[in-house]
Amino acid sequence: MNINSDCKSTHCHDPVLESGRSQSGFSLIETMVALTLSLFLIVGMIQLLIGNKQSYRVHDAQSRIQENGRFALEIFNHDMRMADFTGCPSGKEIDNVLNNPTDWWKNLGSSSVIGYDGTQAFPGKAFGTGSGDRINGTDAIVIIKGSDSNYSIVSHNKNSAEFTLNGLPKIKNGSIMMGCNPSDYYTQISVFQVKNASVNGATTIVSHGVGVVSPGNTTATLGQIYGTNSIMIDFVPVAYYIGVSTSGSSRSLYQMRLTVTDAGVASMEASELVEGVENMQIFYGQYSGTDKIIDPPYRDASDVSKWSSVLSVRVNFLMTSLEDKLSTSLQTVTFPADTGDANTGGNVYTPVSTDRRLRQTFSTTVGIRNRLPLL
């Protein structure tokens, strides 16, 4: 039997041949159109991702600037409000028995607030380009005060130069303290360094003798004997300045505070408080009469004639983003110049032409509570 003839007569079909005839491919034009449309979609998605990323970078930088600016103002304002605080009424005589009591961070009283213009030498840190060095053209300030908390004095033995304090406060050898009697206006306020502190049952014995610690006391005898109504508080000098950040790529607000080593050596040490603070300009409200009313205008540090007459301080921070290339154009802001700009709206601060960082100014005026007149 002839197979071919049978297929012809019975109309046999080849499934392979038939499937080939039923398929058809895309033409070149159709393929190019599809690729073009896909390319547009991909480009659009990439642009969307880039835009979202840039928007996130801008919003994140703005949030960080505002957070850092508010934090810097809050810390500065707290210390500024507490300047001259001793735990006792203001105006009392200061009995400072520390060695070299007129040094910039020991001089409680007339120099509890003292500022430095951008070109004036600040004893806490010199101008320089290294990490932590002060930036030329930015202001600095020293604030001396006592701590918020106090320790209750049980007794004071003048002959043995020892205090007995109620409880077990964490006072270490070398700490600098202040003693005062809040209930007696005529008693002195003593500033001294602790030679030794030890626990005695439920009390703490604090010696203010001479030797061992640094800077040390000039005498073991204080000008006042403190009774049961007296208190002791920590001596807290603070300073602020703008310096080169530890990263080396920006500027930071630095805070200097008193530190005491285990060997009893007390000194001022700087720590980086807030990064991204490009400038700080401070102006001072001073009075000249007896009414303790500020005589306008506010003035630069170089124009203050008597630091003990400063009643309020106006601080201005220029904050900047840590990242560059956030703005499409050069951003200018209004910010005071280093001198001669205390009572104007400031001058226009223009960064270098290639700078695309974001900037924002933060300003506030703080009254020194312990110097303001009682209402």
Image: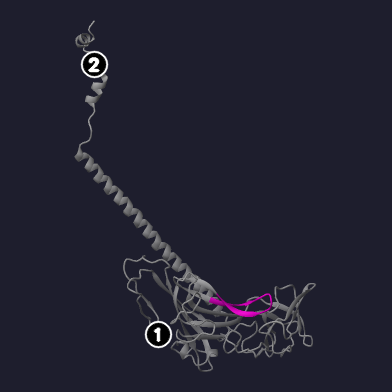
| Above or below for 324 versus 100 | above
- Residue 323 at what x, y percent from top left? 41, 66
- Residue 269 at what x, y percent from top left? 58, 77
| Residue 142 found in image quarter | bottom right
- Residue 118 at what x, y percent from top left? 45, 84
| Residue 175 found in image quarter | bottom right
Quadrant in which the C terminus is drawn? bottom right
- Residue 343 at what x, y percent from top left? 41, 85
**Residue depicted at 35% across the width and 56% down the height:** 50
Query: Which secondary structure lies at badge 1?
Result: loop
Q: In the image, which residues are magenta? A: 255-270
Q: Which residue lies most toward the bottom here?
A: 289
Local packing at callout 2 (Cα closer than 10 Å; few below 14, some 14-19, many 20+) is few
Q: Indicate the amino acid at tag 1.
A: Asp
> Closest to the observer: 325 or 221?
325
Numbered mark located on residue 13 in the image: 2
Task: For marks 1 and 2, give the one nearer the viewer.
Answer: 2
**Residue depicted at 32% across the width and 54% down the height:** 47
Query: Circle 1 is placed at which residue position?
Result: 341
User: Can I make out residue 368 in this image?
Assistant: no
